[in-house]
Image: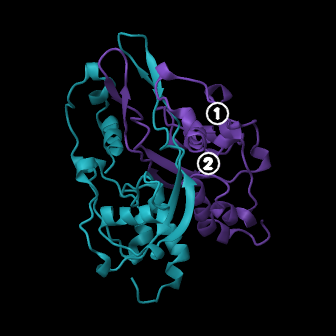
Chain colours: A cyan, B purple
Amino acid sequence: MFSAVYMSETLQQGPQDLKSDCLENWCPLESRLPASAGLTYELCAGIVDKPELSLKEIARQEVLEECGYDVPLDSLKRITSYRKLKQLRTVQFKTKEPAYATRSGVGVTGSKQTLFYAEVTDEMKTGKGGGCPEEGELIEAVEIPLRDSMDFAFDETFPKTMGVIFCFMWFQSNIAPKLPAKVE
Amino acid sequence: MFSAVYMSETLQQGPQDLKSDCLENWCPLESRLPASAGLTYELCAGIVDKPELSLKEIARQEVLEECGYDVPLDSLKRITSYRKLKQLRTVQFKTKEPAYATRSGVGVTGSKQTLFYAEVTDEMKTGKGGGCPEEGELIEAVEIPLRDSMDFAFDETFPKTMGVIFCFMWFQSNIAPKLPAKVE
């Protein structure tokens, strides 16, 4: 779960609750949305913050931590890389001192993301998955039958990232044609 | 151009130049990268900040502002929508007063993005495009021949967003098969 979606939904459904953007004027939300309003379908992902590990090794760890599957390193197939963009915004910060400004997100936005594909079996399920609740993560692995995959990808009632839609399309073009006919 | 990519490249190639994250310790970069290090291939896009306009009308304005093409409103084909995610980060801000914290990106991250497809002709080129330089935008419309489109999409030496890769795949699956054979 990314709380950004929750904030965005709250902003849309009850903008009066978010009038204040500084702690001095902080007040509790008047009509809170349920936590499920912040849930989104997204790819298993992680930050590359361990210089001693390869990208594949980091990806393998994330699959285990978030989804509970222990995949062999050589089964991770590299799809491509891309850039994650977000305009840097200047955060105005008012105190009794003259206003200061800083930049947020350096080192995260603009950074290179690398996508891998892996196939998992029930035998590889060695962990619970779910991410790190102590870091605020709320993760559940979702299984989508192949026959429903493209309907899911383009059904906008399931909030999801561009990465999820892309990966379903990539799978449909690159993997599905090679599968035995009976696999669903 | 998104300066986030420039910052990310600078961080990777000369992290010692970005030691400080607050204005008090600000210093000029020792070895600046050329501006081209911040350039990325991305989709024409804009922020939805005009309640009186429909999504299509905003998309049409962005195509004109950024690419210089005046496309008829009814030629914009809706592809799908998705969520733009980025974990909200708490920005610590040190002053002589006790440390304050604020959130950045509310209303931008987590928000719903809607993708449109449009075909343009030379007759529709009524403006220069290029975005708003006074807002820091540096935009150039790029034409990719159809026969090179998928090579471009997966050639990682061209830094691009997931949206760009997705749209080339979507085009290949949904539009290309219906084109006359001679179109390249």
Q: Tell me the quadrant of the picture where the C terminus of chain B can be found.
A: bottom right
In the rendered view, tell whether residue A98 sits above or below residue A113. Answer: above
Name the mark on residue B137: 1
Residue beneath the point at 79% across and 46% down: B123
Q: Does dot 2 land on a helix, a strand or a loop?
A: loop
Q: Position of residue B91 (x, y in %)?
A: 38, 31
Inspect this view and state whether residue B139 appears.
no
Please tell me in which quadrant of the rendered image residue B99 appears.
top left
Q: Position of residue A50 (x, y in %)?
A: 43, 54
Could you tell me the amino acid type at mark 2?
Glu
Q: Position of residue A119 (x, y in %)?
A: 41, 76
Could you tell me the amino acid type at mark 1?
Glu
Instruction: Return the chain for callout 2.
Output: B
Q: Does dot 1 land on a helix, a strand or a loop?
A: loop
Please tell me in which quadrant of the rendered image residue A59 appears.
bottom left
Instruction: Return the chain for callout 1.
Output: B
Residue beneath the point at 42% across and 68% down: A151
- The answer to whether tags 1 and 2 share a subunit is yes
> B140 or B122, which is in the foreground?
B140
Q: In the visual, does B99 lie left or right of B69?
A: left
Closer to the chain start, of discs 1 and 2, is 2
> B104 or A62, which is in the foreground?
A62
Residue identified by numbered label 2: B42
> B62 or A118, which is in the foreground?
A118
